[in-house]
Amino acid sequence: MKVKVGFLPVSCVYFLDNNMLNFEDPNSEYGSKVWQDYQKMLNLLNEHFDVVADGIVYTEEKSHAMIDKFKEEKIDLLITSNILWAEDYLVLDVVKEFRHLPYINWIFSPYYELKKDIKVREFLRGCGPCGAYQLNPGLQKIKAQIKYIFGYVDDENVIKSIKDYGDVVRAYKCLKKKKIAHIPSGWDIQTDIDLDKFDLYNKIGPRVIHFVANDLKDVYDKVSDSEAKKLFDFYKSNYEIVGVSDSTLDVAVRAALTFADFADENNIDAISYNENSADLHRIMKLNPALYSEGIYKNNRVVGMEGDMLTITASMILKHLSDGPVMFSEILNFDRKNDVILSGHPGNHDLIGLTDETSEVKIVADYEWKNAGDNIHGLEGAWMNFSAKKGDITICELISGKSNFKLLFSKAYSTGETTLEDYSQANIKMPYSIDEFAIKSAEAGLGHHFAFCYGDQTSKLKDFAELCGIEAVDLEAGR
């Protein structure tokens, strides 16, 4: 889904009326440079967005016409830029009309280095910053949340900032339409997994739908033998299987397919399930802990223990990064090497979180083998792997006293294996574990978190600002 952008580059009619800088004349020595600047800006935006624009705006009539055009096109993001100096109200009227939308003010400058003896008309070609700063105090009185971008079209920071903010707006928009399945309820002995579902809906967007285990029964019973055999053969052909009988593996793949089919039938975008539920075990016959491709299509995410906070953090990361996300928990610390030993048994995006260097096995579920409600005598089956190496971002949504907070930090997944027979990630922090332990605890971190690949910290800050919640970057101010 492309974000629809309303683009409003502005200038002043004075430059045309006095023939000082005719930016509408392609043969004008300096005016043509301004028009070329506009075309380059437009081309850059078109690479990432569905753009609504109509040339350089320099009259109130044209500005007000663009308001109507932007409304008709139902834009998601407004971008304005003083391509030259301009009258403030050309921009202020538009921003005021769309104050509810995400907004970028692009402080445009065509120069990287100023040369000596600049001619007046060449100087005027670069007078956009003067207009941008003249405009800025008025903007801040109208619009509380402004994303500022500075530079020329081919500046790497401009290109990255525009693309990244587009990802943020797309995620912000997408989450307003998402549904989380809570199956069944959470685990009552934990206090750090719950939230006010209406606050979630109001602030961030997803709607929580509660299901009971019996809602899965018909889906489980309808899993086709051919699909079950296909997934069964996938595991038998690709992975070492240790201590898991074929009869158990058959039940485990049916449980995985049940989640996928259930999500499809109910248009579910995220599943937060309590694998400790006896009711769930009665339907599934074991802890559902195997990957199925169908579960993870359409940017779907899965989390365990009925944790509503971490499943929401997972959704945010998924839509910001468009890559694999892992639900995890703090297990222990390696203080010497500044590593968090983390992991969680359960349903994970096995294909996305591993690569050709990963050692993957299907092993018996040691939590399930001796469980009291294991009435079928199955060994259970879960995945032994360590998340592949690479730069990552860890993140958790925290339900504070009065509002949500997004806590996050850059980190690195080492790809190493520490735990035997476990779904895990060894996460090296870019600062001491002692510092992480104290700062994260002070910020309110619970025992779960999610992570994705790449540095998403600036996107998370912007996302939190759009949602009106606090952003806590653990690395900030160091």
Image (spheres, grey):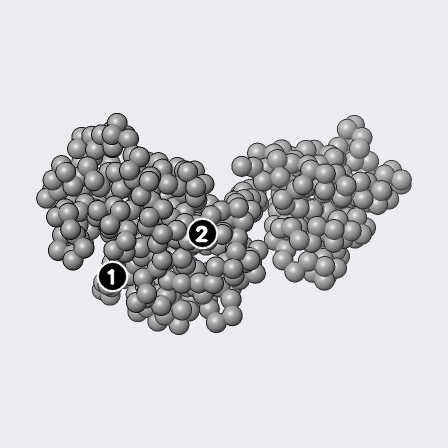
Q: Quadrant of the C terminus?
A: bottom left
- Residue type at the position of mark 1: Leu
> Mark 2 sits on what residue?
209
Q: Quadrant of residue 264?
A: top left
Q: Does residue 99 appear left or right of residue 286 in this picture?
A: right
Image location (x, y in percent) of residue 126:
72, 45
Q: Earlier in the sequence, mark 2 or mark 1?
A: 2
Task: Report helix, strand or loop for mark 2.
Answer: strand
Mark 2 burial class by Cα count in 10 Å: few <14, some 14-19, many 20+: few
Which residue is located at x 10 percent, y 44 percent?
243
Q: Nearer the viewer, residue 294 or 47?
A: 294
* Residue drawn at x 25%, y 61% as measured from the top left: 331
Q: Position of residue 32 (x, y in %)?
A: 75, 32
- Which residue position is annotated with label 1? 331
Q: Residue at x 15, y 47 (%)?
A: 376
Question: Residue 208 appears at what percent x and percent y?
Answer: 46, 53
Q: Is residue 403 left or right of residue 4?
A: left
Residue 86 percent across, percent down from the top left: 79, 48
Is any atom of residue 271 visible in this view?
A: yes
Q: Is residue 456 visible?
A: no
Give the mark toward the camera: 2 or 1. Answer: 2
At label 1, counting other C-alpha atoms closer than 10 Å, the crowd grade (few under 14, some 14-19, many 20 or more) is few
